[in-house]
């Protein structure tokens, strides 16, 4: 095997020759992983204009969901993480929406089969703690967000417009009531061979390392309404009843000055001078086709990291319009 003595850029050369690497080059700040359990993922700098920040603050004071619309790459989902970071509200509870998403699954999951197996144990056999009803209930992101506490949790409902047409109204009911019931744990629930459900049951939250949650009489009621950030790509309209209970924020595409601020925040001021031409090119390309801000960050990172100047095809690939076919 041959050592890699070529340029640092050419990790892979496509010539069939083995050149083992001893370590990978430094990753972009937004693509670094392996955080310690309990610390949460790394938080990247986030820049928002004062007018947009005012809308966010209004939602916080009113305890209303924040419905964010905007083109891909404008920072809709990142705003939830920025809120959790700046307010010290812990890790974001993330609910990514697709066409099969249901509110029931986002509130809690109940392992009815496992519960049935426990109830079918022979009479007199000690099931121990394994038979506790809460062992068969696992809260989802929305259910965990409604757990009572001194401070709210941040809940990110990502791309709600991809979900079923009834999902916004389903969410509306829970967000208006601030509670939900787990019938399987309610005292008036159906008794099983293991006996009636107890008044208090401990269940698991959505956080892998989160503390157990005590459910009383089968109901979870929030004491502080969660900070709810709902994102939408504008693929369809939402019902008026849902919209009037949200504060809407449309994130604009960042202009040239804001783009330079974003680059400075993510990559440092030392790259700004070399990034000016890339920013101008990005703005011009964005006027002709859909581009996301993180594409610009990728291009600046590669250019600052030593991408050969004669590799224009790489630059074109990184800044390829999102509307182009595959």
Image (spheres, grey):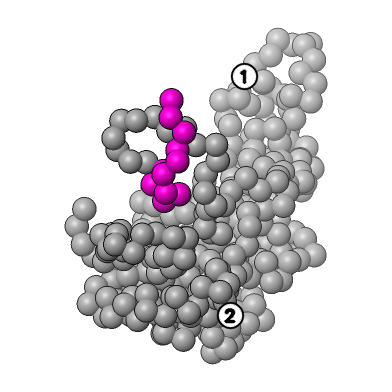
Figure check: 207 above or below 89: above
Q: Are marks 1 and 2 in contact (CB under 8 Å)?
A: no
Nearer to the camera, 201 or 76: 76
Q: Position of residue 297 (x, y in %)?
A: 44, 67
Position of 55 compared to 147: left or right?
left
Q: Position of residue 110 (x, y in %)?
A: 59, 37
Q: Is residue 298 visible?
A: no
Magenta residues (range): 1-11
Residue 7 highlighted magenta (yes or no): yes
Q: Position of residue 164 (x, y in %)?
A: 36, 56
Q: Position of residue 227 (x, y in %)?
A: 63, 68
**Residue under circle 1?**
117
Circle 1: is it few (<14), some (14-19), or many (20+) Cα within 10 Å?
few
Q: How many marks?
A: 2
Tell me the residue at 28%/80% (across/down): 284
**Residue under circle 2?**
56
- Secondary structure of the residue carrying numbered label 1: helix
């Amino acid at each position: 095997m041959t050592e890699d003595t070529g340029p640092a850029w050419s990790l892979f050369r496509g010539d069939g020759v083995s050149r083992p690497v001893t370590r990978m080059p430094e990753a972009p700040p937004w693509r670094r992983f392996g955080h310690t359990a309990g610390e949460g993922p790394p938080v990247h700098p986030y820049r928002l204009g004062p007018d947009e920040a005012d809308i966010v603050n209004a939602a916080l004071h009113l305890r209303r969901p924040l419905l964010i619309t905007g083109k891909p790459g404008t920072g809709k989902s990142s705003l939830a993480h920025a809120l959790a970071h700046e307010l010290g509200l812990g890790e974001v509870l993330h609910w990514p929406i697709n066409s099969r998403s249901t509110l029931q699954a986002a509130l809690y999951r109940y392992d009815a089969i496992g519960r049935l197996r426990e109830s079918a144990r022979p009479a007199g056999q000690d099931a121990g703690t394994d038979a506790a009803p809460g062992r068969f209930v696992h809260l989802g992101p929305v259910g965990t967000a409604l757990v009572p506490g001194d401070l709210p949790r941040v809940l990110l409902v990502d791309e709600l417009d991809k979900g079923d047409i009834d999902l916004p109204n389903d969410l509306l009911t829970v967000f208006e009531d601030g509670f939900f019931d787990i019938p399987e744990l309610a005292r008036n629930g159906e008794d099983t061979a293991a006996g009636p459900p107890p008044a208090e049951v401990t269940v698991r939250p959505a956080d892998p390392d989160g503390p157990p949650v005590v459910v009383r009489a089968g109901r979870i009621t929030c004491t502080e309404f969660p900070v709810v950030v709902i994102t939408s790509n504008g693929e369809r309209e939402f019902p008026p009843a849902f919209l009037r209970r949200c504060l809407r924020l449309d994130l604009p595409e960042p202009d040239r000055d804001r783009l330079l601020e974003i680059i400075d925040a993510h990559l440092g001021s030392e790259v700004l001078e070399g990034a000016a031409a890339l920013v101008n090119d990005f703005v011009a390309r964005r006027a002709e086709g859909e581009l996301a801000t993180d594409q610009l960050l990728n291009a600046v990172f590669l250019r600052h990291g030593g991408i050969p100047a004669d590799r224009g095809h790489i630059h074109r690939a990184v800044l390829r319009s999102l509307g182009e076919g595959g």
